[in-house]
Amino acid sequence: QVQLVESGGGLVQAGGSLRLSCAASELTFSSHTMGWFRQPPGKDREFVAAITANSDDTYYSASVKGRFTISRDNAKNTVLLQMNSLKPEDTAVYYCAATFFRSGTYVKSNDKYKYWGQGTQVTVSS
């Protein structure tokens, strides 16, 4: 059974940094695009970032581009999200997810992801 387990969330002041990690098991990790999504309080889940299977392409939402960096280590079945210059509006539950899709249009859509983690809470105080 595929498992995606996020870690690294927490409480941080505005301007600070956090690094989220997602560990995958029972997944052909190196064949999947990995994505990060978030769900702010009272809002829908939204795309944050994605990285294709061989790290050839990365995608970011406009709201995080330049502040967040997604990376992956296929040898360790892990995908990371380095979040810098955090803002209160980054407060959300962050989820990692896996998909076979690779195109920029599809990887930004949460309905294209088959596997999801349980999420990790990120809270940014002002």
Image (cartoon, rainbow, N blue to C red):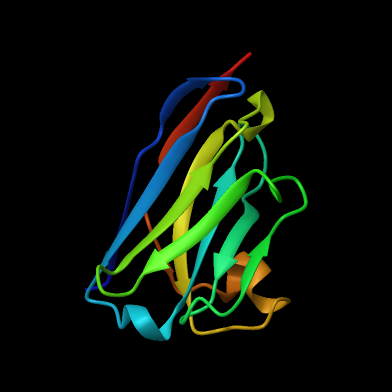
Which residue lies at the image location 50% right of the left edge and 76% below the top edge? 55
In the picture shown, does residue 18 fall above or below 21? above
Q: Residue 96: x percent and y percent?
A: 45, 58
Q: Residue at x 60, y 70 (%)?
A: 111
* Residue 83 image-quadrant placement: top right
15 sits left or right of 55 in the view: right
Q: Is residue 39 left or right of residue 94?
A: right
The residue lying toward the viewer, choosing from 14 and 48, is 14
Residue at image location 60% in from the left, 59% down from the top:
49
Query: Could you tell me residue 94's position as x and y percent?
Result: 49, 45
- The answer to whether residue 119 is seen in the rendering is no
Image coords of residue 74 (percent x, y): 33, 74
- Tell me the quadrant of the picture where the C terminus can be found: top right
Q: Is residue 39 left or right of residue 78?
A: right
Task: Please identify the residue farthest to the top as the structure is shown.
Answer: 126
Q: How many marks?
A: 0
Pick the front one: 41 or 7: 7
